[in-house]
Amino acid sequence: DGHRFIIGSEMPEKGRKKVKPLALEDILDDIAPKTEPKKPATKISAQSDEAELRHFLNMSNDMVAISERDSTFARVNPTFNDTLGYADEELREMTFIDLVHTDDRAQVRNSIVGLMHDDTQEEHIIDFEARVVAKSGETHWVEWRQKRVGELIFTVGRDVTAMKSHEEALRRQEQQLA
């Protein structure tokens, strides 16, 4: 509470200076275990941002992309490249819609137009499923999740092509049994 208590004092002897009374906090400071001051939390430095982001993106088995607000690709992870077969340089000249199967483009445009143009949609997450066409021409079914923060759109996509194939095989098998 801020009050100081005098614990004890000494009577000065002739020729000696008066000794200052000891306060409780002084005694506690002397007997309390010494602890190291806490180190400040590690912060990402501007110089390490790029390397740390690259390491983080490379850890995911999902396709991860960062796009500009107009949906042109700024950065993708290796899983994105490996799944769709496009190099980073090729993707930087494409938009997200360019990858979408022609039969799914209208639905995808409707899903992402608000995210791209409506400022009230910032921080809003959208989920949708759409087919994308790899550089080889192969079609992949992907579950997409997108969020815009400022001028960037963050995208995560999970390739569910194998799951869709299994579902289709089960559906055909059920039809044969019926």
Image (cartoon, helix red, strand yellow):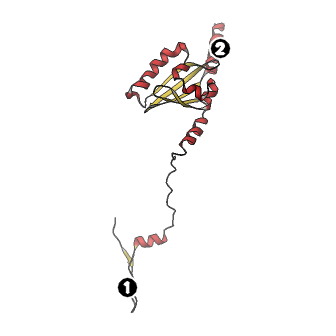
The image shows residue 20, relative to residue 64, as above or below, that is below
In front: label 2 or label 1: 1
Residue count near mark 2 (Cα–Cα under 10 Å), binned few <14, some 14–19, many ≥20:
few
Residue 26 visible in image: yes
- Pointer 1: what residue? 18
The image shows residue 57, relative to residue 129, as above or below, that is below
Q: Residue at x 59, y 19 (%)?
A: 141
Q: How far from the left and from the top, in percent, is residue 22? A: 40, 77
Q: How far from the left and from the top, in percent, is residue 140? A: 60, 19
Residue 123: image quadrant is top left
Question: Residue at the bottom extreme?
Answer: 14
Foreground residue among 91 and 124: 91
Q: Residue at x 48, y 68 (%)?
A: 32
- 82 left or right of 98 in image: right
The image shows residue 147, relative to residue 20, as above or below, that is above
Which amino acid, mark 1? Lys
Residue 59 visible in image: no
SS state under label 1: loop
Q: How far from the left and from the top, in percent, is residue 153? A: 48, 29
- Earlier residue among tags 2 and 1: 1
- Pointer 2: what residue? 169
SS state under label 2: helix
Q: Residue at x 49, y 18 (%)?
A: 108
